[in-house]
Image (cartoon, helix red, strand yellow):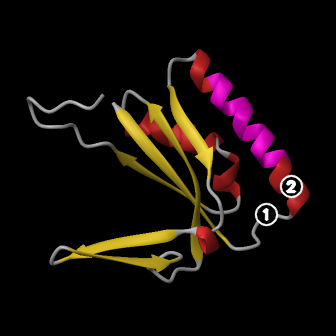
Amino acid sequence: MKYIVLLYAAEGAWPPEEHKAALSESVQLCHKLHANGQYISAAPLEPPEVAKCVRVRDGKTAVFDGPFVETKEQLGGYFLIEANDIDEAISVAAEIPGARRGTAEIRPLLPLPDGLTLP
């Protein structure tokens, strides 16, 4: 089953040198997951200040700067993984450095209905 692990942390939670080390550790974890057949994708995200939010209402598109929801923690990156069950996904999330300074939210991907496929 596919799971996405969304990583959130408060702004400034990672001092620059520690963030650099955590990114290196995350890349090593990606290589480990790849060797185990669990890696699909992972990436850090640019800060919320460069984000755009799009909303379509009544056929009209509106674009807003930054994240729409005000929160203390910001979405900072993700891991898309294969895991046998939620417990295995939790084990992977616990290895992600971002979970040490923030929150790792785990969600299973919803399977598409029969007849629908993605490229």
Residue type (three-letter) at the residue carrying disc 2: Glu
* In this picture, residue 4 sits left or right of residue 66: left
How many dots with numbers? 2
Magenta portion: prevailing SS class: helix
x, y percentage for residue 96? 64, 44
- Residue occupied by mark 2: 18
Q: CA distance from mark 1 to mark 2?
A: 6 Å
* In this picture, residue 49 sits left or right of residue 24: left
Residue found at x 65% / y 66%: 47
Q: Is residue 42 above or below residue 58?
A: above
x, y percentage for residue 99? 63, 54
* In this picture, residue 66 sits left or right of residue 17: left
Q: Is residue 39 above or below residue 94?
A: above
x, y percentage for residue 9? 64, 66
Magenta-highlighted residues: 21-32
Circles 1, 2 touching at the beta carbon (< 8 Å) = yes
Which type of secondary structure does the marked residue at label 2 adopt?
Answer: helix
Residue found at x 81% / y 55%: 19
- Residue occupied by mark 1: 14
